Structures are given as structure tokens and as C-alpha cells.
Amino acid sequence: MIKKKYFDIHKPVFWPATVLIVIFITITLVVGQPMEDVFQGIKAFITEKTGWAFIIGVNVFIIFCFYIGFSKYGKIKLGGKQAETEFSTLAWFSMLFSAGMGIGLLFWGVAEPVSHYANPPSGESFSIPSATRAMNLSFLHWGFHAWAIYAVVALSLAFFSYNKKLPLTIRSVFHPVLGDKIYGWMGDTIDVFAVLATLFGLATSLGLGVKQISGGLFFLFGLPNTAGVQIMLLIGITLVATISVFSGIEKGVKFLSEWNVRIAGILLLFVLIVGPTLFIFKSFIQNFGNYIDNIISVSTWAEAYQEEGWQGDWTLFYWAWWISWSPFVGMFIARVSKGRTIREFIFGVLLVPTILTFFWLTTLGGSAIYLDMQQEGHQLAETIVADESTALFVFLNEFPFSTLGSLIGILLVTSFFVTSSDSGSLVIDTITAGGKTDAPVGQRIFWALSQGAVAAVLIFGGGLVALQTAAISTGLPFLFVLLFMVYSLYKGLKIEYARTVVIGKEHDRKNYEKRLSDVILKNLAKKKKNE
Amino acid sequence: MNKLKKIALFVDLSEMDSLMLDYIKSLDDFFDFQELYLIHFIQMEGVSKEILDLLPSLGKPLTALIEEEVRESAVEFFGRKNENIKVYIQPENDLEALIEWFEKEKFDLAILGLKASHNGSGIFSRKIIRLNNCTTLFLPETVKPKFDRIVVPVDFSTYSDKVIQMAQSIASQAKGEIYPVHALKVGIQYFPFIQNTDEIKSTLEKEARANFKKYQSKYPFLKDMAILGNQEEKISIQLYKYIEEIDSDLIIIGQKGRTGDSELLIGSVAEKLISNDKDYPIMVVK
């Protein structure tokens, strides 16, 4: 087959997705500022009416993960019995770490725990219970539930592409239920949902990144922190990211993504050393225990007996956000996990990134709370909560070398932006090209630009609320895709297991041996006669 | 869909092979197959060392040896030169490779022997039926190439359509007659409360007859359906008794029934028929 040079797309997925994105961009631009109310309305509607579905959904994912991790299916190897791992366990762990590290943690690492501490869903602000619960809630949002969502998607992708040799795209996961219909309109629809979810989830992340960069520049140099500046920055960085895709400096991106994690690690170490070291270690243990102790009550809490609103801004936003960009993280994890057994996979993906994330949240957000508790008047917490985008920099300002720290912070977010945009466009490109991973670079540029455009339009049309709404409203339909995925994966694993049992059964050796020997002896006799 | 063109025959070097070739030959008279593959799976684990030591003195590999042997038996039945008959030998005990190759070839029908005389000798056949994705015909040792009475169990699932179409295409070619049969299934949810299941049975029976009417209007060649309703016995046993009573020449059943049980990889009734049957050819439609 001749490889198409510039465009190699799967039309029934590429065009509907593109048209929907263009429609979205046009409407937002035409309506202009009033869009903010529209976004607010959509967000309130979805979180109020369907919040419970998200809460049930994420708990289904985690229970499913534990079930298959411990069950007999845990022995199934991704890529078949003979498959070997491509990376050592340590390298695999560090890749899982890096999958969990990104713009989100930089943006919310300080802002979220402090925000829960200053504005708790119930109870007294700035109190010890609200501090403990702040960490507990932050852990909930970034913990096992988040990784269970990714694990389901990643495992499904890995299993159906490695073991069942189907194309690496979301529709393949539904083969046990839909059969060859996945190649028809049903599969196309599923993939369109996946593309939209990934794109909007990524745009949310990119939008947050650019808000933070702008916040940092304001904090350091007094550059106005407005939507206009943010959009300019967004265009600038998107172009840089696009050039990096276009010029094919894959190595550059690889280099960046490796160093991202290292620099993030250095930042973490820095705060750990100059910050309240002992407190961090002590509270890490306590927060973790507290999280495990409360995991059921906190993860099933649905604002049933109180005024609604808090959960929509936080928990539901996170669930929807994780769901919406689960194809992105899932595909990354799937690619590096060939040769792992399902048991290894589940517990690796659930535990490794979660523990790192918890440590990050304790070190940054926990320390910020600790510092604030030492002060009269809670000036620090007030300033952090006032603007999430400057939270990290306000916090770093409490330590020596704060300008350097903030600069590193800004560079880190920028660099995460570039790598997310780059790998995000690769994932979307793979889905819209029908599972091909080597589609022409032109398409990736197109998707890198669309992500930037969507993020810009979202900031234009309503800032943080619009970014959150984007994640929530694409997360909702994809939640049902994921629940369906759980069923389909279960069915696929059940059949696979039954097959391995059947293949492993003993044959009737004795009779066969005799017949085979007869054939050989007969031939020997024949040969002797001829001689 | 019922064009049977590409046929796979699994041979195991036993006396069964010639029986099956004979059967295929008479099937071929009706269907005019285009390609016939003779497939053999070498189970190296079963071969003793002494025998293997003799191999080098023969000067050719085991696969070539078996290929010759299989080809010879084919020539016996189909004449010397027949380009449409191919031989495939799967070496090294690699069942997964065999299945992968088999799926790629996209056969219309697989034929396997199902021996009763040695206990456990049908294991290979029973494996293949679960792992492949094509309609499979099991032949017992007592098989005769006759197609006068074809029993077709129907449960009104999606497979029933396929089964009836397959039966019709065989019956019309071979001038046989189709015997549709349906087993009533009283749901166990009734049992704790209802002593007398006759009433439920008669409702179910009416329902089944109504369903079958629809089939008859779709497939006018179908004659009336027999209904089995003995709640004391398992469906597979009732079915088997019916088959014996008719003295059927061929049973055609769907791969799965209404409740698809993926643990077995085939429907439970089909599975039981294959496991217990000794005397009747069974075709499992996929």
C-alpha cells in the first residue's frame, strides 16, 4: 500500500470531529462575552443533574480494577504468553510517574489544598479539621479513582491491540460486544466522542497552563494578567509547539519530557529541604492513612444533605476532566506496558503514580497550609485562594531564591505545555487516522493548532469556568463510553481466559504417538527396500 | 452465506481420516467444493525419543513426511492430480499459530473427527470448536454419508436463522428433510412457588408455536416443529433422545443459544451434544 504523503485520515472520524470543533469555536466567537453565562449554566446543569452518575462511575472503575487485579484474569499477559516487557520495571515505574506529572499538578498542587482549607465544603475555615480534610479531598481527586479511570482505558487499549491485534483506537475496545460493527458507524461515533473528549480535556489543561504562565509573569514582572495576554501567550506557545512537531525535532520533545520530570523532581526536593521537612514527612503518613480510612465515605459523598455547588466546582470537575482525557493518558500507559501481566499492570498504574502525586500534594499544598497556620490573619492562604494561577508563585515566595524558583516554575509549565500539546496531537491523530501510529506529520500540526485554538476560545469565552465546562461537558458522554468499556473489557478478558484454558488442555498423547511412529517406521521400511 | 466453498479437514493419521475423506467426497457431489485443505497438527510432545532418533536417517523433515502421507490418502479418494487439494502441517505443537493461520484463511466449513472408541481422543476436536470462528462439522466413526433426516434445534435466537438456512441449503442439495425441534425451558424463577408447571408450559408452548409460525412464513419449506417439554431432563438429553428416535443423519445447531455463555466459548447445549454424542454427525454453525 502506498503511504499517503500529506493526509492519511479515517474520514468518518476526522470530519465529524473537525466540523464539531469548528462549530464550537464559531459559536463562542460570535456570541462573545455572554458565553460565560452559557458555560456557567451548562456546568451547573450537568453537575447538579448528573453528578451522581459520575460518582457511581468512578467507583465502578475502581472496584472493577481491584476485581480484575485480584481475579484469575490477573494472570493474563498483555501481548500474549510469549510477550516480553520492553522496559525494566524501574523504567516502567518512572514512566508511570511521568504520566501522572503535568500541568494539572503544577497548577493545582498548591492552589487546591489551600482552597479547601480556606473554603471548606462545610465546617470552619482555617481550622485543623478543615486542613486535614483539605488534604483528604485533594488526595481523593488525584488518587486511586483518577488512576482507576486511566487504568481501565489503558488496559482496554493494551489488551485489544496487543492480545487481539486490533487497531490502537478506542473503538477496538468494543469488539467483544459489537463485533465487526466497530468498523461501521458505531465505531466511528465512539471514536468521534473520544477525539472530542481528548481535545477538550487537553484544551482545559493547556488553558490552565497558560493561565499559570501568565500569572507567573504577572507575579515576577508585573505583566498584566488578563485574558488578552493569556491568549497571546497561548498563540505564541502553541506556535512553538507546532514548530517542534513540524520540524520533526522529536528528540527535542523527548529531551523536554525527560527533563520536565527531573526539574519537577528538583522543585519538589527544593521545597522538601527548605520547607517544613519534618512536617512534610509526618503529614504525608497521616494524610495517606486518613485517605485510606475515609476513602469510601469521601468518594461516595454526593452533597445529598447540603446545599449543592462545592462538589460541582471540584470533585465533579476532576472526575469529568480525568474521564475526558483518559484516552490521552491511557494510550501512553498502554504503549509502555506490553509484556506486563494484568495484575502487575493494575497495581503498578494504581499505586505508583498515586503515591508520587500524594507526596507532591503534601509537599506543596500541605506545606502551604502549614505555613499559613503559623501566621496570624491567614494572609498567605487568602492570597493563594484569590487567584489560583499565581498560587504556586505566592507559595514559592515564602522561600529563599524565590525569583529563581518562580522562573523555574514558569519554564516548567511552558515545557509541560509543549510536551502535552505534542503528545496530545499524536494521540488525537492516531484516533482520527483509524489507529495508525505513523500518520503524516501534517495532521498532527492540524491537531496541535486545534487544541491551541480551542483553549484560546475557551479563555476568551469565560476563563476558568469555560475550561472546566469544556472538561465536564465532554466528560459526561465519555463516562458512558467508559462504563460500556468496562463491560466490553470484562467480556473480552473472560473469553481470553477461557481460550487459554482450552489451549492448555492435554491432548491424547499415547494414541497419537503410535500413529506417528507408524508413519515414520513405514517410511523407514520403504527406504530400506529402495536401497 | 451458505456457499460452502473452502473446506478444512483436520486429519490425525488414524483410520478416521479415510472415513472423513469418504464423507467429504459425497458432500462434494452436492456442493462442488472449490478448495479442500487437509490440516494436520503435530504434537511433538507425544513423540518418544527413540522414534525421533530414527528421523535423521530418513533424510527429510517430519513435516515433509507427514505431508506426503496425508497427500497420499487424499489421492486415494480424489484421484492423482488435484490442485484444489492442499495440505497444511502445523509443526512444533503450536496450537496458537495453527489457530491464527486458520482464522486468516477464512474457511467456510471445518470438519473434525469425533471418536468414541478411545476415551479422551476427541480432546483436540473439542479444542478446535472453541477456538475457531467457522462452522464446524463433527463426524463420529460410524458416520455414513447420508442426509435424509436433518434435525435442527431452534431456540429463536439469532443463530436459529443461520441454522435453518444452512439446513435448507444441505437439504435441498441432498434431497433431505428438515426436522425442526424446540425444547421448552421453564425458568427456574417459577419453581419455588408453583407446584404445577403445566400451565406455564402450555403458555410457553403457544408462544413457541407462534414464533415458529413466523419462521415458517420466512422459510416456507419448514414442516411442523417438534416440541420437547420434559422438565425432569436436561435439554441436551431430551434432544439426544429425539435425535435417536428420528435416527437423524445430521444435526445442525447454533454455536450459541439465547444465553451466550462465554466461559465455554460455545453454547451449553452444543457443548453437551459434542461431548456426549457418539453416533451422529453434528454441525455447529457460527
Image (cartoon, helix red, strand yellow):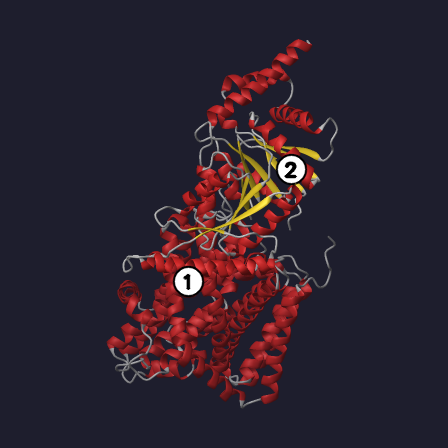
Please report, as a chain letter, where disc 1 is located. A
**Mark 2 secondary-structure assignment:** helix
* Residue under pointer 2: B27
The answer to whether dots 2 and 1 both sit on one chain is no
Crowd tier of the residue under label 1, counting other residues whose Cα lies within 10 Å: few below 14, some 14–19, many 20 or above: many
Residue A466 at what x, y percent from top left?
50, 81
- The x and y percentages for residue A5 are 73, 60
From the top left corner, tell me how far across and down residue A228 is, in percent.
57, 85
Q: Secondary structure at mark 1?
A: helix
- Amino acid of disc 1: Trp
Q: Amino acid at mark 2?
A: Leu
Residue that numbered label 1 is attached to: A147
For image coordinates 50% across by 56% down, the residue present is B156
> Outermost residue, left direction?
A128
Quick check: A89 left or right of A121?
right
Of circles 2 and 1, the one toward us is 2
Asked whether residue A77 appears in the rendered view, the answer is: no
Query: In this view of the protein, which residue sits in the foreground, B275 or A358?
Result: B275
Q: Residue furthest bottom?
A: A34
> Which quadrant would residue A519 be assigned to in this image?
top right
Depth check: B279 or A259 in front?
A: B279
Residue A249: give x, y in percent of width and height: 64, 60
Residue B68, placed above or below residue B197: above
Mark 2 nearby-residue class (10 Å; few <14, some 14–19, many ≥20): some
- Give the answer, above or below, for where A28 lies relative to B236: below
Looking at the picture, tell me which residue is in the foreground, B260 or A92.
Answer: B260
Q: Is residue B200 left or right of residue B32?
A: left
Task: Return the chain for callout 2.
Answer: B
